[in-house]
Amino acid sequence: MSVLDVDAVSIHFGGVKALQNVSLEVGEWEIVGIIGPNGAGKTTLFNCITGFYRPTRGKVRYRGRNVSRLDVHKRAALGIGRTFQNVGLVKGATVLENLRTAQHLETEYNPWFGIAGGLNSFIEEGRITRRGRQLLALLGLSDVADTTVADLPYGMLKRVEIATVLATDPDLLLLDEPGSGMGPEEAHGLGETLLALRKQFGTSIVMIDHHVPLVTQVSDYVYCFNFGEVLAEGAPEHVRNHPEVARAYLGEEPVEGGGAEADAGTESGTAGTLPVVREEEYA
């Protein structure tokens, strides 16, 4: 049974076809990458999977259950966790406080006992604090546990957001542009971290990113979206070298070999080495 099955989903906003007959499947322990130009429908798909949007047609199934009409919080309770393009953290709180807050559904004491300062509340608060610190250590964030979120650079905020979502113990992790704001080395390090997290937690991951080398580094299967439709799908290198993908990104045919400019990751790169789109280009 698939963890996630998006079956012929279309989403229309008036006359705008944001998604058109999109199908996508995610298996156990699988990392699926989604690439595509701005406005291709990638984040719209995430909004549909998590319940912010409901499909005009088609179905979303999570572990065989049709969740197409289920509310956002109920899908989250089933095990669907998500990050956002714009970092969804409490900026005035510390990093650790954000992770503690994320675990509020997991607390096993009555809130009134927490207000009264009962023994169970102290034990439970200690447990969620320890778990928060463990997750921060896994993501290399121990040194910023007590730092206010507003004081962190953007690339580090994306890691904090991943740690916060992991604190909810998801079975399916949806990452919306986790590599934005990162240089090549930092993005490669994030890729290694995602592979390690999958191994440790057994989590299936769907990742949207413009940083094509990051997507191909970690993904088992890749989809390329364009104008609300699936333009190409398959193994990472197959999609990366697909001529239609090159045209969607660059408006030109792929050139064998790449060349110096392609190796540098510039806008004039080829399909074999699609460019790394910088944060300001798609913010």
Image (spheres, rainbow, N blue to C red):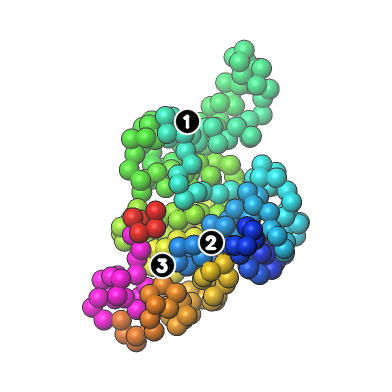
Q: CA distance from mark 2 to mark 3?
A: 14 Å
| Dots 1, 2 in contact, CB < 8 A | no
Q: Within the image, what quadrant is residue 152 found in?
A: top left
Q: Which residue is mark 3?
A: 212
Q: How many marks?
A: 3
Q: What is the spatial separation of the Cα atoms under label 1 and label 2, in whole angstroms?
A: 30 Å
Tell me the number on the disc at residue 87: none
* Disc nearest the viewer among 2 and 3: 2
Q: Which residue is mark 2?
A: 42
What's the magenta region? 259-278
Q: Position of residue 276 (x, y in %)?
A: 34, 65
For the stretch drawn in magenta, the main secondary structure is: loop
Rendered position, 1 above or below 87: below
User: What is the three-letter code of the residue carrying label 2?
Assistant: Lys
Mark 2 crowd level (few <14, some 14–19, many ≥20, 10 Å Cα)? many
Residue at 38% in and 81% down: 252
Does 175 lie within the magenta span?
Answer: no
Considering every residue shown, the one lying at the far bottom of the view is: 256
Q: Which residue is mark 1?
A: 97
Query: Mark 3 is on which residue type?
Result: Val
Tell me: 280 left or right of 174. Answer: left
